[in-house]
Image: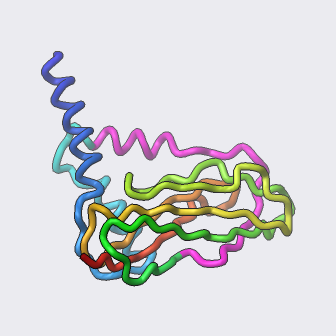
């Protein structure tokens, strides 16, 4: 039993490390990034990892706040050419276009190389908030596409924010 648990634990750790390995991909739109992220969790290559992905999806935050609507300044950003090892960030501006306060409950990046900051207080109707994604390019070369899922009290959550960069040596 201990041996099985050890193998599962090592598989989970290995999966976490592999998820941020070097990616040489063409710059992709948000739809292609969404397809890639669902393909990664649906792949039955390692049955010990599959339940972890399913649990992470099941644990997605559900808002009990009244629903509202949101407008984004943009949902995709291109950092362009950056040097390997650069740590960059981009601020996505959100506007509450509904009639109830907007509550961002969580921002989940698709990779450990991306860290989020976001407005934690309720955003009143007509007011603006911010979601900042910080990206560490140390482990990448070439074109990369990354994403973060934003969970809030809106009808079509999560909202996918994406960014691309071309990592230069």
Question: Does 50 sit left or right of 157 as displayed?
Answer: left
> Which residue is the extreme one toward the top?
1
Question: Does 129 sit left or right of 126 as displayed?
Answer: left
Magenta range: 50-75
Q: Nearer the viewer, residue 158 or 120?
A: 120
> Which residue is the extreme one toward the left?
3
Q: Is residue 132 above or below residue 107?
A: below
Report the residue at 16% width, 50% height from top: 45
Q: Quadrant of the N terminus?
A: top left
Give yes or no for residue 72 being in the magenta stretch: yes
Question: Does 131 sit left or right of 31 as displayed?
Answer: right
| x then y, percent, for residue 58 | 47, 42
Q: Quadrant of the C terminus?
A: bottom left
| x then y, percent, for residue 95 | 75, 69
| x then y, percent, for residue 23 | 24, 68
Give yes or no for residue 1 being in the magenta stretch: no
Question: Does 100 sit left or right of 61 as displayed?
Answer: right
Report the residue at 42% width, 42% height from top: 56
Q: Nearer the viewer, residue 88 or 126?
A: 88
Q: Nearer the viewer, residue 51 or 151?
A: 151
Toward which corner of the image does residue 4 lie, by quadrant?
Answer: top left
Q: Nearer the viewer, residue 44 or 30?
A: 30
Could you tell me how many numbered marks the image carries? 0
Toward which corner of the image does residue 164 lie, by quadrant?
Answer: bottom left
| x then y, percent, for residue 78 | 46, 80
Report the residue at 31% width, 76% height from top: 167
Q: Is residue 104 above or below residue 127?
A: above
Report the residue at 25% width, 48% height from top: 17
């Amino acid at each position: 039993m201990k041996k099985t648990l050890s193998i599962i634990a090592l598989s989970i750790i290995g999966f976490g490390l592999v998820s941020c390995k070097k990616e040489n991909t063409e710059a992709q739109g948000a739809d292609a990034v969404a397809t890639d992220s669902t393909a990664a969790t649906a792949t039955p290559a390692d049955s010990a990892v599959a339940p972890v992905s399913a649990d992470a999806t099941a644990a997605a935050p559900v808002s009990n706040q009244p629903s509202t609507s949101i407008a984004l300044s943009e949902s995709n950003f291109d950092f362009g050419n950056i040097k390997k090892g650069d740590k960059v960030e981009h601020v996505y501006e959100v506007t509450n276009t509904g009639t109830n306060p907007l509550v961002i409950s969580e921002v989940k990046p698709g990779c450990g190389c991306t860290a989020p900051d976001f407005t934690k207080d309720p955003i009143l109707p007509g007011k603006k908030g911010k979601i900042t994604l910080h990206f560490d390019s140390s482990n990448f070369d070439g074109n990369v596409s990354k994403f973060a899922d934003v969970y809030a009290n809106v009808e079509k959550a999560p909202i996918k924010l994406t960014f691309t960069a071309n990592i230069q040596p």
